[in-house]
Image (tube, helix red, strand yellow):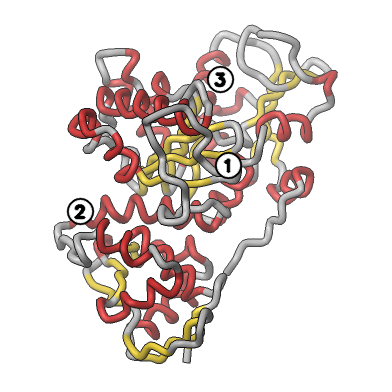
Amino acid sequence: MIAIRPGSRVHRLLFLLSVAGEYPAKSLHLLGNGRDLKKFIHQLEEVRDFRTDRDGTVYTTKLLTVSGKRDSRTIRLYKGALPILSEIHPDALGYYLESFRKHRFSGDSTHIWRNHRVSEALALSMMAGIEIRPYILPRLQKTGIHHTVPESPSFYIARDFKKLDVSELNKTMFTRIVGAVFYPGGIYAVYNTRGAVMKWSGMGELKTTHHLLELSRMNAGLDEVSSALLLGTGPDIALQTLIQSDKSRRMELRFDKIYPHIHFIPMNQDGIRLVRILTLPDWNERVLGALFDSQMRPKGYGFMEYDAFWEGTYIYSHLDSDIARLVRFREALETQTEKFEVMCFPWQAGFLKEYLGQRVILKQLEMGSLEAALGINCALTD
């Protein structure tokens, strides 16, 4: 018998699928040990007894089905197991049935991959400690200025907040955004390019940003949407997505013009840990304060972007994985003769060495050291 307890693997799968509908089999590594989870998923495809933690009710059923091949291989809830959703939250089943056409899914690969992009962003956010369940989160509104969003980080799915403005729905429904993360003092638009260069929809994304800005003002008191999280399998893919937007004939429709700060998030445990850092209150000042003494920090605006100066060397931090800022930094390097150091995590070093060449010295910092300085428990749930 498998007990469904808060925090257990089966409980996390249930509430993830109650929100995402389906999940890619190839991305189980985001939820813990991929090999162990693959075996566990196979067990859940067989009829078993499940005992709920709430009142001890026992359900005898399959929990999951797995279908499809290669990139389209997808994990879904078994229809007979849907009543269990009411055990994890009274509103979970109603949200699931309304969002996924009463448990009817398309077999078209385009629809599956779109769902997978959303579900991977949800899984990574969930593992980073961000609340992702719409039936628990306060609903966003456009009727007045209220502080609606929670004080803790929260993920709002694009398909839900796009519906708030019916007049704009046709202009934004096919954009690439998968959601938005609100955190204390800020908001990120969330995109997932996976393992391919994302086709950028400039005008649609610009209108989506305006929609997000209005939601931010009315629900969080924020006056700008200037940052995005770009999920992907590697920084080269993310950078190519950014460069691809250069083909737009209108400068204001480029990815890095709509979002001056684009943080690349690898879809692995490093990405989960990075998102934890990026959703701390006042995270940027806290990170820079942990790295540099006040006398090292630049005073006012300089000739280019850098974060510290010490003994004749300009120091730039890429610990935030901001690839839009990195592009601006490399462009400025081409006209400078000063000495430069770039701080990075070990997993960023290979990409930075290739992208920046021999022009800079890389200084690597273990992520655990920064997490300790910020007071973050770096242990991830398996």
Residue 329: image tag: 3
- 57 w.r.t. 382: above or below: below
Residue drawn at (54%, 77%) of the image: 5
Q: Is residue 263 visible?
A: yes
Q: Secondary structure at mark 1?
A: helix
Q: Residue 121: image x %, image y %?
A: 42, 50
Residues at marks 1 and 2, CA–CA distance in whole angstroms:
32 Å
Q: Earlier in the sequence, mark 3 or mark 2?
A: 2
User: Which circle, 1 or 2, is nearer the viewer?
Assistant: 2
- 27 w.r.t. 59: above or below: above
Residue drawn at (30%, 37%) of the image: 164
Residue drawn at (49%, 77%) of the image: 36
Q: Quadrant of the C terminus?
A: bottom right
- Left or right? Give the position of 213 relative to 329: left
Q: Secondary structure at mark 3?
A: helix
Residue drawn at (49%, 64%) of the image: 31
